[in-house]
Image: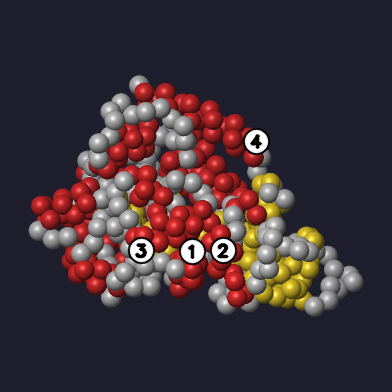
Amino acid sequence: MPILLKNGTYIHPETLQFTTTHILVEEGESGAIKFIKDIPSDFNFQTIDCTGKFITKSFVCGHHHIYSALARGMGAPKKNPENFNEILEYVWWTLDKCLDADMIEASALYTAMASLKSGITFVIDHHASPNVINGSLEIIANAFEKVGASHLLCYEISDRDGVDKAEEGLNETAEYLKNHQALVGLHASFTISDETLKKAVELANQSDTGIHIHVAEAQSDQLHCQENYGMRVVERLQKLGAMESGKTILGHCLHLSENEKKIISNSPVWVVQNTESNLNNKVGYFNAAGLGNNIMMGTDGMHSDMLRSAKAAFFVGQNFDTIGYDSVYQRFRNADKYLINNNFKGHGHNNLVVLDYDTPTPFNTDNFYGHFVFGLESRHVQHVISQGKLVVDNRKLITADEDEILANAKIQAARLWAKMRG
């Protein structure tokens, strides 16, 4: 059934033009929205009164890790990490090895729910579960679709657990790509052999898709590449053909040389920044200078709130980045462009948020950026429409039972933590 958003103020996501109108929202993967002046007397719509509310296109998370959803509040690792590589070894690589199918499903359900409630209807995820590789992407996809969120998934292929695990990751990716849009995921240069990287690039080319990989998140990634391959990370990726697709995503990109920045800016690939994760891991600060315009934003599994991520990028960037009021919003919205330019499905015009924004000051096109940085928060998300279907109504998920998702997540988190301690 079509949805009628009555008497709302629509904010165009690109021009930022404000239009007070009625909006008819069509259902479906490619459904449209129509502005109508008068409501037909014989209409058969699901009607939502948006008087005093603001309507705009929903949000995209450009880099997530659903596998971290059950980590919140877990106990300290067996060894206190002293650097980024030890954070991976004693925290995240310990966690991902303990995941089973039930934990993955619980993580995906919670992440989808949390994303939708903060206005994100599309998640680009990078998954790892070395002891449950086969079928893991299908588990995540089914969970997201059950709740009503769209997705672009990949499995994090890596040689860190042996060649057999890398092959299994390649096979899982190839199998999943037969029936789904997806990327070919790779962990990072320092855990990927030339042979695995070449196979991943070949699979991406055969499947007309891109690579999704962490790049120079810490200086150690560069040091490993220089010591083992005699070149820097982006140079290695270029040499082996991983920099040629506009669907490819490079995560982080903190420790780059001028030549690497030039390679990126002259390529069609996309960079995704993850400010809060970088702060948490003490690995450095993102700076967009020299990288070109293909920059978007993610959460790196820290949370599922892109408005929060944008604010963090702006405030941290005042000292470390070439970021301003217009460019923080541009990066926030660039994931839209990434999906549209590459013909990925699930983020059409009929993906919308209705914002109950209680501003004490005038709000219009001319001062939108000031409100975006200093005012708008996920608590203002009242309704969310995903592919023309109402999925969040008055801040409550209506496509699945929130209490059931949370209760099961607690059970699976306790199982995970016990397994990590064992």
Of label 2 and label 3, which has the lower sequence position?
Answer: 3
**How many residues crowd mark 1 within 10 Å: few (<14), some (14–19), many (20+)?**
many
**Marks 2 and 4, Cα distance to the nearest angstrom?**
31 Å
Q: Which residue is drawn at 25% across and 58% down?
A: 255
Q: Quick one: SS at disc 2? A: helix
Q: Which amino acid does label 3 sit on?
A: Asp
**How many residues crowd mark 2 within 10 Å: few (<14), some (14–19), many (20+)?**
some
The tag on residue 372 is 2
The residue that disc 4 covers is 403
Q: Residue 195 location in percent, x, y?
A: 18, 54
Q: Which is closer to the viewer, label 2 or label 1?
A: 2
Q: Residue at x 30, y 40 (%)?
A: 88
The residue that disc 1 covers is 332
Which quadrant is home to the C terminus?
top left
Q: In this view, does 142 lie above or below 409?
A: below
Of label 2 and label 4, which has the lower sequence position?
Answer: 2
The residue that disc 3 covers is 321
The tag on residue 300 is none
Which coloring applies here?
secondary structure
- Extreme residue toward the top, this view: 422
Q: Is residue 306 visible?
A: no
Q: Which is closer to the viewer, label 3 or label 1?
A: 3
